[in-house]
Every structure is written in C-alpha cells, then in structure tokens.
Amino acid sequence: MRRLTRRVTRLGGLLVGAALALAPADPAAETHRVVIERFAFVPAELSIRPGDTVRFVNRDLVPHTATDGEGRWDTGTLSLGAAARVTFEAAGTFPYVCIFHPSMRARIRVVPE
Amino acid sequence: MLKALRLTAAAAALVVSAAGCAAAEQPKMNDLEIAHTAYTAGNLDIRYAHMALAVSENPAVLDFARTMIRDHSAVNDQAVALIGKLKVTPQDNPLSRALVKGAAEKRAEFGRLSGKAFDCAYATNELGYHQVVNQTVAGTFIPQTTVPELKQLLEGALATFQAHEKHAGAMVKGLKCGA
C-alpha cells in the first residue's frame, strides 16, 4: 500500500510550513495519530499539548480530508494510504470535518500543561 | 414526492427482482460475476451523478453527485487494480445486465425532469439504490465471495456505500420533496 506524507502545517499564529525538518526542535512535543477508517476519524476526540503534531492517515478506499471547521488548517485530499501532519502551537478546540463527507466530524483539544 | 417514491420503488424493485431472478437461475454467483456486478453498480451511479451535475442547480445535490463520482471512481480503481493483480476478467451476468437496463430506463425518466422534480427524483433514487445495493453486498456478495482480497475490497466498499446511504437520506430530507 502506498503511503504518502503530504505536508506539515503549523498552527499557532497559523504558520504553514512545508517540511517537518523546518519545525523547531521541541523534545517535549509528541506526534499523535488519527486514523481515518470506515468513514470516521479515530479517535474522534483527541487531547494534545501545544506544539504537538497530529498525523492523519487515511485507510479508507475513498479520498477524505481533515479540514478545520473555521478554515484554519486543512490536510488536503488524502487518498488511500496517504497521510498528512498538522502541528498545533496554540491552545484551543479545533472541530474538524471531512469536506467530502459531512457526517464525518471530530475534534482536537489543545490543552496547556 | 409521490412520483419520486414511485421512481424509488421501481428502482428498488428492479434490483431486487433482478437479484431474485439471478438467485433463481444462479443460486450462487462466482467471484468474477460478483466483481463485475459490483463494478457495474458503481459505474451506473457515476453516470447518474454526471447527469445530476448537468441538470441540477441545487448545491446539496451537486455536492452529493461530486462525492459519488469521487468515491465510486476510487472504489472502482481499486477493483481494477485487484483484477490486474489477480490476472482475471470479471464475468458479465444477468444481474449486471438487469442493472444496466434498469439504469438506462431511469436515466430516460430523469431526462424528462428538471428543477426540484429532478433533484427529488435523483435524491430519492440514490437513497433507494444504495439501500438495495448495500443489502445485496452485505447479504449476498460478501458471504459468497471466496477470494480474500475481493472480500476485503467489498467490505471496504460496503462501508463507503453505507455512508452514501446516510448522505442520500440527509439529502432527501433536506430537499423537502413532500413540501
């Protein structure tokens, strides 16, 4: 199965980057995974810390997106096996959807320690 | 609304009767026939969607149609890849032929409609079509499939079509076809 990492998006001032190597080194930052399967984001609720990255992986046959409800970030189209990373710098709650399948909804909470 | 319901009932009856006919004549479809019919059903829904894109001006209908084209194309691309990998040729069969014939008749009906009448007919047919396809895939195709890769593909396709059924239901409700 083909696996692609499309891009890295940094949030918190909404800085959009192009590569993980450009992200400042933060030994405390973690990378979390959200799997898209059977038309659902798993887990649907995810709590992370500022500076953490979420990697979205599509395991469905059809394309999906993970798109912020307020347009602040978007993974773009993720075909089967594709992945994208989004880094969240600022605290807050980020509801997101798949723009192709409106019933797919989930949320990321960025909570300071 | 009544007309739309009749259209749906006719579509559902077509597939059910076709399935029943096939079941009577061919108690068990083989993997190549199942692959052919599943691919055909997807292609027919893509054709309905292209018609919707050409006729409808309703944003919800247009969004749904684009999703049908995107999703069914993706599923069928996977089917083609699997067929290539297995080096097999899907087999045409009575159920596939009944689906093609019924869809041609349905498109002819749609061709006489426009505006809300078209939107409601298309949306209601999509709901009925996916309901029957899902019953067939879950109740007949997956249990009868023997090749593990095809079974896995059908299971993924079923999840897709079940989401389409929900989406179609929401579209029908949003169109307020009975109002």
Image (cartoon, coloured by chain):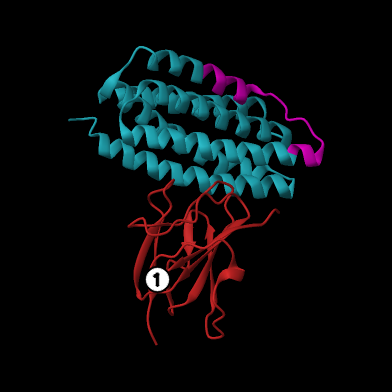
Chain colours: A red, B cyan
Q: Position of residue B160 (x, y in %)?
A: 51, 46
Helix, strand or loop at mark 1:
loop
Instruction: Describe residue A34's horizontal placement relative to residue B128 as left or right.
Output: right
**What is the span of residues highlighted in magenta in the rendered image?**
B83-102
Q: Main secondary structure of the magenta part?
A: helix
Q: Quadrant of residue B165?
A: top left
For the point 57% across and 28% down, the residue is: B43
Question: Split into 4 quadrants, where in the image is the C terminus of chain A?
Answer: bottom left
The residue at the point 34 percent across, 24 percent down is B56
Residue assigned mark 1: A12
Residue at image location 70% in from the left, 36% down from the top: B80
B130 above or below B11?
Answer: below
**Looking at the image, residue A39 lies above or below residue B134:** below
Chain identity of mark 1: A
Q: Amino acid at mark 1?
A: Gly
Would you call the spot at circle 1 few (<14 residues within 10 Å), some (14-19), or many (20 or more)?
some
Give whichever of A96, A43 is nearer the camera: A96
The answer to whether residue B97 is magenta is yes
- The image position of residue A109, as x and y in percent, is 38, 73
Viewer-proximal residue, A65 or B136? A65
The answer to whether residue B95 is left or right of residue A12 is right
